Image (cartoon, rainbow, N blue to C red):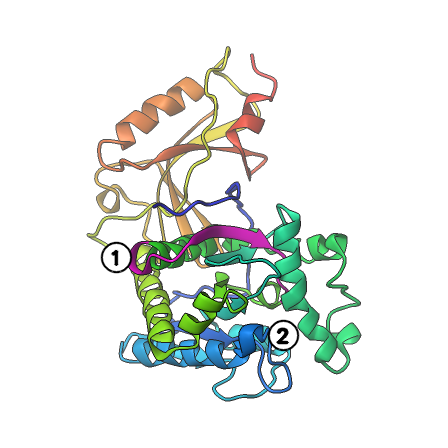
Amino acid sequence: MRTHITILIVFFSISLTFANSFSGRKDKFVVVLDAGHGGHDPGNVGNGYKEKDIALEIVLDIGKKLEKNPNIKVVYTRKTDVFVDLFVRGKIANEADADLFVSVHCNSHSSQAHGTETFVLGVHRNQTNFEVAKKENAVIFLEDDYEKNYGGFDPNSPEATIGILLGQEEYLDQSILLASKIQHNFTENLKRVNRGVKQAGFIVLHQTVMPSVLVEVGFLTYKPEGSYLNSRKGQSDMSESIYQAILDYKKAVDIYIGEDLVNVNPVEKTNTNVSDSIFPNITFKVQIAAGSKRLEPKSYNFKGLDDISIEKSGSLYRYFYGSTSDYNQAKRLEQEAKKNYKSCFIVAFKDGKRIELSEAFKSTSN
């Protein structure tokens, strides 16, 4: 069963000046692990199981496995049963100049709902996603000076949650990549019920400036699942799945000269039957690859292709072949690139900003 990504993935060309995780000023891949809740905040206590304890055990196990890799540095937001403000968790990740932020939680519901789901920061697509985020965000009411720390943010307001998303899109595609790998491992390796990769407005994700996910490893309110998650086997299974997903993610975004580049962007299917092919205000390019290290745009780095351009978004570099306002010419460039980069695809820019192809085709043409 494949992972069902329930959100439309879009692309952004905004660059952050905050950090380049692979700029050479650090030699390790930094992963921040966040065990949800803690201290006087137990999280949900379905069937008597405590979310804070289960999340911590899973996180510590992930960290122990990651720490065996000499190229990975692990930072924890908490390693014991203490309460940590949500904004402090984000601050820990940002100050660590992290490459990934992974927050682990357990779900609850009044029904017999069960299964795993992994969230990235985004607009709620339905009421269910909003309710999950609202529950997790309500933790701020346990914090001192929460109104000051979160600018009057109200977890009960969908409008307020949408407001926190502005300017946070730079890492969406990388976050989705990691979330998809986590869900795949849960589903394929552990045969857990797959509730998919979803978007919602989690404050703890908003506070971070790097690819970030929030993992709901299952429902404590569903007794069989709660019992499993409360067991050593369940916690070990979940930690192993997340650990392997992190390693797979790191491998996917690490690129080196002489090795194949990777495309990490799923493509929105678009109707490309356009009556005119010239769009004077649009620039079409072919995205051939993306990765975490910058390569010089020379043909020897791109299997003989020249006319290479680069776009930096967060810690990710995207590489493009060609540049034209003629969509038919862009299709020819795409076919040429496909000889070596089978997952390449056409993207559009207007006034230097990335836009969807469907929007580009609405532009006035000759």
Mark 1 residue type: Tyr
Residue at image point 22% right, 44% down: 300
Residue 269 sits above or below residue 257 on the image: above
Mark 2 residue type: Leu
CA–CA distance in space, label 1 to label 2: 36 Å
In the image, 90 versus 37, the foreground residue is 37
Mark earlier in primary sequence (1, 2) = 2
Task: Describe residue 311's horizontal placement relative to residue 111 as left or right.
Answer: left
Residue density around tag 2, few if under 14, some if 14–19, many if 20 or more, within 10 Å: many
Q: Position of residue 145 (x, y in %)?
A: 77, 80
- The residue indicated by pointer 1 is 256
Give the number of the disc on residue 211.
none
Q: Tag count in the figure?
A: 2
Residue 292 appears anywhere in the view: no
Residue at image point 42% right, 81% down: 57
Residue 37: quarter of image: bottom right
Task: Describe residue 206's horizontal placement relative to residue 222 as left or right.
Answer: right
Residue 72: quarter of image: bottom left
Q: Which element type, helix, strand or loop, lies under badge 2?
A: helix
Residue 120 sits above or below residue 240 on the image: above
Does the magenta-highlighted stretch encompass residue 291? no
Magenta-colored span: 188-203
In the image, 90 versus 62, the foreground residue is 62
- The residue indicated by pointer 2 is 86
